Amino acid sequence: MKKILLLLLIAIAVNLSAADIDLWKNSTLNKIIQRGELRVALDPGYMPFEMKDKRGKIIGYDVDMAKKMAKAMGVKLKIVPTSFDGIIAGLLTNKYDIIMSAMTITQKRNLKINFADPYIVVGQTILMRKELASTIKSSKDLDNKKYTISTRLGVSGEIAAKKFFKKAKLLTFETEADSISEVLAGRADAFIYDQPYNVLFMSDKGKGKLVHLDKPLTYEPLGWGIRKGDPDFLNWLNNFLRQMKEDKVIGFSDNLYEKWLVDTKWLKRVQ
């Protein structure tokens, strides 16, 4: 009986070991190392996380993080510019290894892909025509059929607009620039988008023209997206993220936050 039990335990151990080996072979992390290249998808139209400078080079908060990630892996970095509305589909068809595009972690997206732990938390805020400052005291006042709200199509701003402003007219556009232009031109009354973007816009083009209703409407953690069924890659990403936070590389008092979300010197590179 003891011999049978011993043989059974040995068989289980061998099977577990083989399963672990197969899991590692199929891991995205292993494939990245074998390839010698980390392929990162992002949509370069969302300041200050990813955008193109005057020379067409993609820069931003997420780009700097991707560089640090590739360096930690000991591989080269390949940025794959991808439209946001198709970015999850591209990941699922193996066109790249990871999404690093300021993507909000939502339950709906989590049904299709997995997320590493959040690397930063943002919320949706409102930029409003200055002329309405005496009438609109809070975001709730905008929920009226006489007001028009703009935002970008397919992002958290659209979700928030539909959730909190059921009476107001909603306009959606392909880019943030087109959306906010509607407000500046007087064709819309308010613009809903991520707080970091709105803070930066108010420090530049919105100064003296718009009012920032800066109390966030939502709680939105941003995370890196990967394919499901890949515990090795997820484990590595979360350990990497933890190290970056402890080293004060990312967070709310870090060099990347200061560089991209507080200091606006980089605006000269994109204007």
Image (spheres, rainbow, N blue to C red):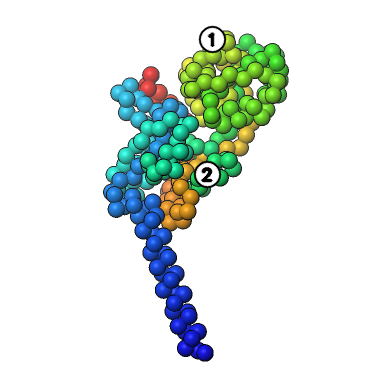
Q: Position of residue 89 (x, y in %)?
A: 46, 38
* For residue 152, above or below residue 114: above
Q: Which residue is drawn at the image coordinates 47% and 84% (left, top)?
A: 6
Sequence-first tag of 2 and 1:
2
Task: Check disc 2: other Cα within 10 Å, few if <14, some if 14-19, many if 20+.
Answer: some
Quadrant of res 109? top right
Residue with the mark numbered 2: 112
Q: Say what amino acid the circle numbered 2 marks.
A: Lys
The residues tagged by marks 2 and 1 sit, at their Cα atoms, a distance apart of 38 Å
The mark closer to the camera, 2 or 1, is 2
**Circle 1 sits in a helix, a strand or a loop, which is it?**
loop
**Within 10 Å of the Cα at label 1, are there few (<14), some (14-19), or many (20+) other Cα atoms?**
few
- Image check: 254 left or right of 130? left
- Asked whether residue 37 is in view, the answer is yes
Q: How far across and down, in percent of the image, does residue 189 sit?
A: 61, 15
Kindly tell me whether residue 203 is visible in this rendering. Answer: no
Q: For the image shown, how many numbered marks are present on the structure?
A: 2
Q: Nearer the viewer, residue 45 or 108?
A: 108
**Where on the picture, by quarter, is residue 47?**
top left
Q: Secondary structure at mark 2?
A: loop
Q: Amino acid at mark 1?
A: Ala
| Location of mark 1 (residue) | 185
Q: Quadrant of residue 132?
A: top right
Q: Quadrant of the C terminus?
A: top left
Identify the residue shown where x is 61% and y is 37%.
219
